[in-house]
Image (cartoon, rainbow, N blue to C red):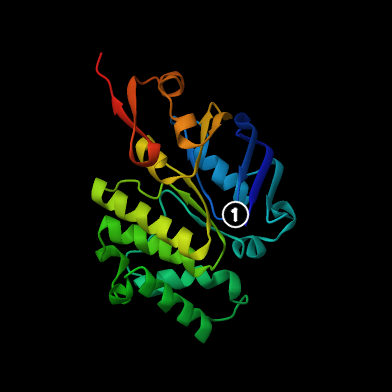
């Protein structure tokens, strides 16, 4: 499903955080939102979901999200926050089952289909053997997969992932990014992520959107966005940019 954001403004505590932000995310593509700390990356995802007050237009497959109820939005878009709450005493299966909430009636209980969808998602993510394990007994990489499993259990066509590789070592970062890409390609998902690691963003995303001071500074293919000049201007960093696999940019720091 195509995601369109037009002229999005967000102010928190009277302070402008996003100003006139527009995005065009084609169906089945992967867009990465990058930018320095405080640029408004996480706020942008939350605004798309209607979790913070905003002005502007957000549509998914032509549907105005502002006219939909939370349950209806949750059937279109799945979201994983940067620091999800993982109750230590809850099992992997029960946590993943929470992704079925948009389909369970108020005061109702999950049905056989909800449990079947949950089991299938855990199997796809190689988590079936962890179904009865408590969340507090998982490693960092396993927790990230479980968070993604809950999102996939919603069976939406759009995934918004806020820093899905946060606090992971380089090996687990690669595993998570490869998993997201495989799922996107196999299921035709539209993916929007925020990410701090610029090289990682450039290696996996189809398109990058660089936010700076709450505005879109530049957007386009990774090689168009991750230039030496753009990184120096918006991140205050000196880098060398070299082409990697498929011409995708790889960044390395330059010492003075």
What is the x, y in percent for residue 213? Answer: 54, 26
User: From the image, which quarter does the C terminus lie in?
Assistant: top left
- Between 207 and 217, the one lying in front of the other is 207
Indicate the position of residue 79 as horizontal and vertical percent values: 51, 56
Please name the residue shown 47% across and 47% down the image.
Answer: 193
Residue located at (50% from left, 68% from top):
99
Is residue 146 toward the left or the right of residue 215 in the image?
A: left
Question: Dot 1 lies on which element?
Answer: loop
Is 190 placed left or right of 230 in the picture?
right
Quarter of the image for the N terminus: give it: bottom right
User: In the shown orientation, is residue 241 left or right of residue 77?
Assistant: left
Q: Residue at x 32, y 60 (%)?
A: 143
x and y percentages locating residue 249 in the rendered image? 38, 34
In the drawing, does residue 99 fall left or right of residue 204?
A: right
Asked which quadrant contains residue 74, the reply is bottom right
Residue tagged 1: 27
Residue 111 seen in the current view = no
| Closer to us: 17 or 208 | 208
Is residue 42 something one can see in this rendering? Answer: yes
Q: Which residue ends up furthest to the bottom in the rendered image?
A: 112
From this view, report whether residue 255 is shown above or below residue 184. Answer: above
In the image, is residue 83 above or below residue 19?
A: below
Of the pair 40 and 247, the residue shown nearer to us: 247
What crowding class fits label 1: few (fewer than 14 Cα within 10 Å), some (14-19), or many (20 or more)? some
In the current view of this chain or complex, which residue is farthest to the top?
A: 256
């Amino acid at each position: 499903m195509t995601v369109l954001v037009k002229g999005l403004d967000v102010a928190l505590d009277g302070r402008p955080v996003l100003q006139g932000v527009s995005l065009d995310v084609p169906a089945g593509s992967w867009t990465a939102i990058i930018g320095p700390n405080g640029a408004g990356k996480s706020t942008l995802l939350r605004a798309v979901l209607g979790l913070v007050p905003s002005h502007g237009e957000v549509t998914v497959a032509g549907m105005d999200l502002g006219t939909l109820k939370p349950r209806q939005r949750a059937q279109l878009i799945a979201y994983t926050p940067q620091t999800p709450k993982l109750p230590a005493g809850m099992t992997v299966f029960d946590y993943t089952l929470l992704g079925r909430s948009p389909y369970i009636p108020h005061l109702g209980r999950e049905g056989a289909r909800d449990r079947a969808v949950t089991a299938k998602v855990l199997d796809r993510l190689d988590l079936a053997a962890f179904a009865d394990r408590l969340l507090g007994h998982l490693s960092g990489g396993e927790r990230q997969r479980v968070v993604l499993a809950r999102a996939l259990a919603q069976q939406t066509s759009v995934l918004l992932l806020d820093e899905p590789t946060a606090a992971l070592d380089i090996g687990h970062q690669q595993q998570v990014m490869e998993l997201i890409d495989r799922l996107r390609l196999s299921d035709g998902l539209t993916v929007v992520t925020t990410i701090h690691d610029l090289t990682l963003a450039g290696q996996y995303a189809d398109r990058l959107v660089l936010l700076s001071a709450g505005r879109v500074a530049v957007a386009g293919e990774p090689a168009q966005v991750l230039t030496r000049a753009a990184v120096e201007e918006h991140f205050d960093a000196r880098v060398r940019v070299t082409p990697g696999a498929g011409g995708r940019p790889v960044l390395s720091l330059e010492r003075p």
